[in-house]
Image (cartoon, coloured by chain):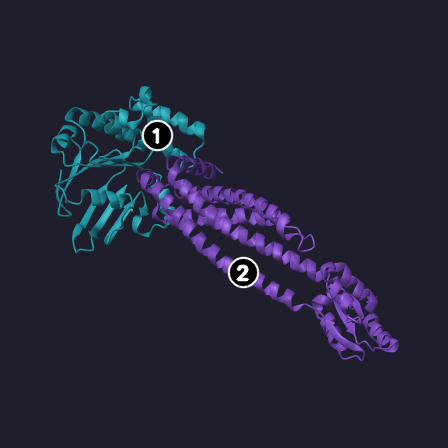
């Protein structure tokens, strides 16, 4: 699913965010990326999202070399991804339901199809009863569940999460992780960047530890 | 079609949220179009009047007091054979004097005091419009002047030429002002669009990350500019119409009598349509320029 070969990301100040990173994530895997702040976790996710391009090396996702994608190909590639952020990035002026249907709407999916699918994913994350609420009326855990529902509405083959539990207490964090494990059980490859060692221990999946842009531990 | 529908809905919602700022942008566009429209209104009417006057052009051939009937016959023959004239009338010395008395009644005593009739006999010649335009009339005038028995020829085309040239100059100068104002309006529209863009940056980021097509990402901002430009243009046309009604009242009471009943007319529908298209184009381009920061 993901194949990084001698991947480096050099910023203009001469600082390496990633340096000669090589790793493979198989289809259907659930992988944690961990390490201290500045280790390169978020940079790796940004490369996977094609928000940035590698300075050196290659990154192939689902058979596509991300360094050579054209604009239209980037759009197609991203339609197969789901993403979750620490700060949820929900649109405060839209209801829960509208936040979720927003994604298929901007991809041109007809209204009846996107409504049906939105209801399914909301039900799956247990928030169908809050579909008309606005994000700011929800708790942090509920907001993150909405974000997960939004990430799943397009049935992504790869789900990327950057510190998805960073704003949540331990109980809610575990709840969110359980949801992500269920997503993974459905066949979706999941890559989570987190520095929460305790959570990683509780979930118990393959963990890649980065420090100063390099892999320092594989567990 | 879905992208268009989405863009229009989002644009409308965004404009409603920032309605105060959007109103300023609409007014800025309206002002630019009012300037351009007023200029078109003035120059279009002036051009129309010039053309009207040109099409009814005539010249007067003043005969020497001692001109013989043979000399007058030769002049008339040249006029008739030239193909440049649509008709002619002979005005005798007596008739010229009586016209003077009729047209300038307050000066009639002055004419009575003169022992001799000072007014020359003349031929008033109506020129064919095509001969006026292709220069045959002017050439004919040059030939007539040289004929024996002719004292003078009055062919006042220069002022029409000067008027046409003034209309062109006014049009160019006004166009430059209108372009500057349109640029200022475009900057205002772009600022309003950028304001909306700033407020929706999370939304735009999500759209980019889910692989939304450019039409969905930039479309709403172009549509915002389009709506502001269109609203500004329609507002400008309304303002122009009110200005026109006021100008027509003033014209009817103070000017029309001096210009032989010449009428003012509002811009033809095609020019109104072009102004609306221009407004929407300026708005859309400003929206497109502002949306470069999105996606």
In the picture, measured across the screen, residue B293 lies left or right of residue A210, that is right
The outermost residue toward the top is A129
Subunit under mark 1: A
The outermost residue toward the right is B70
Dot 1: what SS? Answer: loop
In the image, residue B178 sits, relative to residue A48, either above or below, namely below
In the picture, measured across the screen, residue B61 lies left or right of residue A12, that is right
In the image, residue B58 sits, relative to residue B290, either above or below, namely below
In the image, residue B71 sits, relative to residue B280, either above or below, namely below
Subunit under mark 2: B
Disc nearest the viewer among 2 and 1:
2
The x and y percentages for residue B152 are: 74, 75
In the image, residue B257 sits, relative to residue A186, either above or below, namely below
State the hue of chain A: cyan
Q: Is residue B265 visible?
A: no
The x and y percentages for residue B34 are: 50, 49
Q: Residue at horizontal 44%, vertical 35%? A: B9
The x and y percentages for residue B294 are: 35, 45
Residue annotated with mark 2: B170
Q: Is residue B106 visible?
A: yes
Q: CA distance from mark 2 to mark 1?
A: 52 Å
Q: Which chain is purple?
A: B
**Which quadrant of the structure image shows residue A209?**
top left
Dot 2: what SS? Answer: helix
Count of residue discs: 2
- Towards the viewer: A53 or A25: A53
Residue annotated with mark 1: A94
């Amino acid at each position: 699913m993901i194949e990084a070969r001698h991947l480096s990301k050099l910023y203009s100040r001469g600082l390496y965010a990633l340096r000669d990173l090589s790793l493979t994530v198989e289809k259907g895997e659930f992988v944690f990326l961990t390490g201290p702040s500045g280790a390169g976790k978020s940079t790796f996710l940004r490369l996977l999202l094609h928000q940035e391009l590698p300075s050196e090396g290659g990154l192939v996702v689902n058979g596509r070399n991300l360094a050579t994608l054209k604009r239209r190909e980037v759009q197609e590639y991203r339609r197969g991804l789901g993403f979750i952020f620490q700060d949820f990035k929900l649109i405060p002026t839209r209801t829960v339901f509208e936040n979720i249907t927003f994604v298929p709407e901007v991809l041109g999916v007809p209204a009846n199809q996107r409504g049906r699918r939105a209801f399914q994913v909301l039900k799956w994350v247990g928030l169908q009863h809050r579909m008309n609420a606005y994000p700011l009326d929800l708790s942090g855990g509920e907001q993150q569940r909405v974000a997960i529902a939004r990430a799943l509405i397009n049935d992504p083959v790869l789900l990327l999460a950057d510190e998805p539990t960073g704003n949540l207490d331990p109980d809610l964090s575990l709840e969110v992780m359980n949801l992500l494990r269920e997503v993974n059980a459905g066949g979706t490859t999941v890559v989570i960047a987190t520095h929460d060692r305790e959570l990683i221990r509780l979930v118990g999946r393959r963990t890649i530890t980065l420090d100063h842009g390099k892999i320092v531990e594989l567990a | 079609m879905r992208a268009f529908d989405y863009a229009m809905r989002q644009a409308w919602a965004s404009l409603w949220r920032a309605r105060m700022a959007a109103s300023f942008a609409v007014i800025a566009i309206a002002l630019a179009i009012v300037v351009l429209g007023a200029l078109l209104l003035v120059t279009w009417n002036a051009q129309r009047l010039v053309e009207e006057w040109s099409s009814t052009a005539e010249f007067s051939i003043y005969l020497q007091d001692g001109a013989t009937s043979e000399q007058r016959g030769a002049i008339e023959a040249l006029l008739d054979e030239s193909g440049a004239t649509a008709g002619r009338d002979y005005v005798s010395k007596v008739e010229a004097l009586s016209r003077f008395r009729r047209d300038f009644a307050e000066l009639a005593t002055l004419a009575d005091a003169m022992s001799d009739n000072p007014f020359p006999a003349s031929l008033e010649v109506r020129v064919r419009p095509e001969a006026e335009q292709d220069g045959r009339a002017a050439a004919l005038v040059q030939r007539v002047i040289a004929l024996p028995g002719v004292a003078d020829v009055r062919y006042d085309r220069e002022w029409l030429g000067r008027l046409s040239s003034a209309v062109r100059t006014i049009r160019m100068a006004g166009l430059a002002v209108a372009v500057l104002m349109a640029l200022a309006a475009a900057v205002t529209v772009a600022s309003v669009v950028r304001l909306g863009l700033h407020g929706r940056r999370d939304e735009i980021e999500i759209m980019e990350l889910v692989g939304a097509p450019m039409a969905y990402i930039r479309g709403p901002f172009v549509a915002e500019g389009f709506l502001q430009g269109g609203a500004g243009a329609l507002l400008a046309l309304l303002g122009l119409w009110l200005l026109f009604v006021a100008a027509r009242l003033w014209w009817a009471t103070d000017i029309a009598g001096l210009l032989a009943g010449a009428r003012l007319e509002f811009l033809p529908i095609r020019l109104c349509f072009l102004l609306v298209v221009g407004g929407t184009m300026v708005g859309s381009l400003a929206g497109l320029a502002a949306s470069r920061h999105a996606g």
